[in-house]
């Protein structure tokens, strides 16, 4: 381990917006620090987004940019977008002058583009982590000049230069990849009954309407079946769902966000989830029987592709978003009561787990950097 302060590296990690971007970024940062504790890491995110809260909680500093994405539902809200983009580039310039990074890592989200674009302009090595099987437009543009691009699966040469791609899998949060929490400890943490079968329903940090609506409609059935529920509603319409959840009997825990996801996964006998790349990666590591409800409006319907890969390997079950209202609750409770099926799914999904993607990425980044500064600021 090199702790020579004079030779220590400074690295910016840019991106956020959702847990699917934030948690892999933190995992990469932790892996970099584990290799060399003298590395200085600064995160750059978008003001008002969840990274501004979650990154400091993980022990890292973050700078916020005044930037938003394109609003497809209201063209009027996009009037100020060009001005925000211009302002964000000035903010990035000042951040670089103050921090003097040796490298920049982009993980996706609004702030990735201006930060990596500026780094590329200044000749500073840039690295991209693309978690999905279909790359976003910003990452495709940035990938042309990136030093290296880390991806989760094969076939990404359709989006990036083949000679820059490295298949690493997706980094998983340390609390999940290294969890030793028992089922009883998880159940106790949420104040539930260790003798009752437990469903964990999650729709990502922003929420999943189709999942949440089904759960809300069947709260009374959860009591009738003598089972229990851990319910992460996500941010969207959380007050409504939490209100109904707290009116339910004591066999329901409900909240907008689960900070201790290791305990929730340990407690769960069956999971209901969207099929974002990071959710899939974490459920593989946790070895949990899962019913996926893919978000149908993801680019190129990539969540359905993610889920189907597991379904085809007898490692998960899937209900389409359109069929969720009619079929989801029955599919979840049928699986919950079928211990043999749960065992099969658990074994098969566990075979697909990648537990050291963060370490692979961190080592490759450091190996790619030379001792001199990457550019001028």
Image (cartoon, helix red, strand yellow):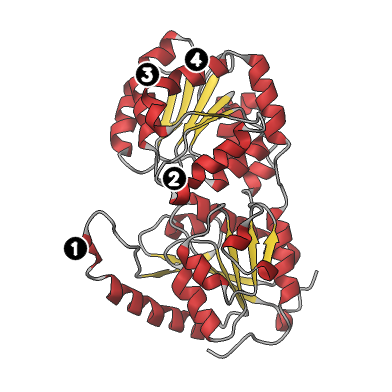
Residue 162 is tagged as: none
What distance separates the C-alpha of mark 4 from that of mark 1? 47 Å
What distance separates the C-alpha of mark 3 from that of mark 2? 22 Å
Q: Is residue 333 above or below residue 360?
A: above
> Is there a contact, CB below 8 Å, between mark 3 and mark 1?
no
The location of residue 100, given as percent across then percent down, is 56, 83
- Where on the picture, by quarter, is residue 269? top right
Q: Residues within 10 Å of mark 2 (few under 14, many from 20)?
A: some
> Does label 3 or label 1 sit earlier along the sequence?
1
Q: Residue beneath label 3, please?
A: 218
Q: Residue beneath label 2, please?
A: 205
- Asked whether the viewer can see residue 248, the reply is no
Residue 76 is tagged as: 1
- Where on the picture, by quarter, is residue 123? bottom right
Residue 367 horizontal side relative to residue 129, left or right: right
Q: Residue beneath label 4, please?
A: 227
Query: What residue lies at 64% left-to-right and 42% top-to-bottom?
Result: 176
> Does label 2 or label 1 sit earlier along the sequence?
1
Task: From the viewer's side, name the closer residue of 223 and 146.
Answer: 146
Label 2 element class: loop
Q: Residues within 10 Å of mark 1 (few under 14, many from 20)?
A: few
Residue 110 horizontal side relative to residue 237, left or right: right
Instruction: Give the foreground label among 3 and 4.
Output: 3
Label 1 element class: helix
> Does label 4 or label 2 sit earlier along the sequence?
2
Query: What residue lies at 49% left-to-right and 77% top-to-bottom?
Result: 117
Task: From the viewer's side, name the closer residue of 129 and 264.
Answer: 129
């Amino acid at each position: 381990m090199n702790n020579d302060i004079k030779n220590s590296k400074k690295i910016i990690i840019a991106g956020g917006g959702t847990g699917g971007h934030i948690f892999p970024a933190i995992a990469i940062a932790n892996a970099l620090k584990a290799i060399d504790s003298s590395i200085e890491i600064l995160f750059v995110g978008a003001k008002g987004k969840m990274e501004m809260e979650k990154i400091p909680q993980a022990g890292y500093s973050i700078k916020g940019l005044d930037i938003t994405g394109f609003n497809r539902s209201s063209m009027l809200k996009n009037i100020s977008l060009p001005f925000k983009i211009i302002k964000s580039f000035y903010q990035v310039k000042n951040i670089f002058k103050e921090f003097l990074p040796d490298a920049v890592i982009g993980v996706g989200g609004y702030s990735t583009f201006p930060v990596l674009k500026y780094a590329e302009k200044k000749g500073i090595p840039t690295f991209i982590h693309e978690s999905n099987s279909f790359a976003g437009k910003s990452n495709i543009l940035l990938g042309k000049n990136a030093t290296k691009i880390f991806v989760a699966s094969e076939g990404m040469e359709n989006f990036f230069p083949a000679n820059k791609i490295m298949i690493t899998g997706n980094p998983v949060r340390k609390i999940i990849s290294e969890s030793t929490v028992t089922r009883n400890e998880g159940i106790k943490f949420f104040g539930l009954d260790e003798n009752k079968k437990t469903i964990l329903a999650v729709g990502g940090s922003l929420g999943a309407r189709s999942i949440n609506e089904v759960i809300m409609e069947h709260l009374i059935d959860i009591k009738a079946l003598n089972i229990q529920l851990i319910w992460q509603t996500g941010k969207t319409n959380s007050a409504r769902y939490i209100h109904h959840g707290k009116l339910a009997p004591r066999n329901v825990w409900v909240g907008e966000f689960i900070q201790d996801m290791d305990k929730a996964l340990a407690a769960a006998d069956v999971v209901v989830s969207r099929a974002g790349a990071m959710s899939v990666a974490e459920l593989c590591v946790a070895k949990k029987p899962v019913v996926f409800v893919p978000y149908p409006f993801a680019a190129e319907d990539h969540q359905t592709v993610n889920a189907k890969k597991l379904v085809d390997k007898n490692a998960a079950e899937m209900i389409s978003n359109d069929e969720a209202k009619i079929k989801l609750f029955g599919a979840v409770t049928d699986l919950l009561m079928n211990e043999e099926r749960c065992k099969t799914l658990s074994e098969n999904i566990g075979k697909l787990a990648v537990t050291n993607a963060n370490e692979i990425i961190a080592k490759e980044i450091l190996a790619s950097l030379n001792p001199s500064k990457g550019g001028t600021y």
